[in-house]
């Protein structure tokens, strides 16, 4: 399975609580933090929910 790198690039201040919880579920707690995940449908759905707060690229 392919891996993706998810980086938080915008603040979660003033975001709905559901989006804040989604960021924490992805493992993102701080601005600029990068986490690696498998590109499963569940993870891609979470990334899609907060796509305006994160950047995504394929891991090498």
Image (cartoon, rainbow, N blue to C red):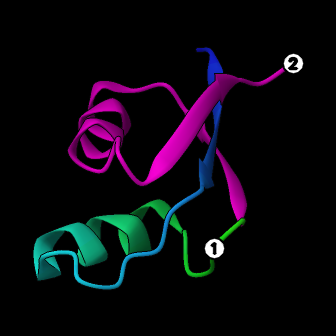
In this rendered view, identify the residue nearer to me: 41 or 15.
15
Q: Residues within 10 Å of mark 2 (few under 14, many from 20)?
A: few
Q: Is residue 19 left or right of residue 57?
A: left
Q: Residue at x 57, y 32 (%)?
A: 56
For the residues labelled 1 and 2, the Cα–Cα distance comes to 22 Å
Q: Quadrant of the C terminus?
A: top right
Q: Is residue 28 above or below residue 17?
A: above
- Residue depicted at x 45% and y 60%: 26
Element under label 1? loop
Q: Is residue 51 magenta?
A: yes
Q: Which residue is mark 2?
A: 60
Residue 37 in percent (x, y) is at: 59, 41
The image quadrant that residue 57 belongs to is: top right
Q: Which residue is mark 1?
A: 31
Q: In the image shown, does 46 or 11 lie closer to the viewer?
A: 11
Outermost residue on the right side: it is: 60
SS state under label 2? loop
Q: Position of residue 16 (x, y in %)?
A: 12, 76
> Which quadrant of the view contains residue 28?
bottom right
Q: Does 32 sit above or below residue 47?
A: below
38 in the magenta segment: yes
| Marking on residue 44 | none
Q: State whether residue 21 is above or below residue 36.
A: below
Q: Nearer the viewer, mark 1 or mark 2?
A: 1
User: What's the residue at 77%, 24% (across, down)?
Assistant: 59
In the rendered structure, the answer to whether residue 33 lies left or right of residue 13 reads: right
- Locate residue 52, reporting x and y percent: 35, 46
Q: How many marks?
A: 2
Q: Residues within 10 Å of mark 1 (few under 14, many from 20)?
A: some
The N terminus - image quarter: top right
- Cβ–Cβ under 8 Å for marks 1 and 2: no
Q: Which residues are magenta?
A: 33-60
């Amino acid at each position: 399975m392919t891996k993706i790198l998810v980086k938080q690039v915008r603040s979660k201040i003033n975001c709905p609580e559901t989006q804040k919880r989604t960021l924490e579920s992805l493992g993102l707690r701080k601005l600029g933090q990068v986490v690696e995940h498998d590109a499963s449908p569940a993870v891609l759905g979470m990334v899609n929910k907060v796509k305006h707060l994160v950047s995504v690229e394929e891991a090498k």
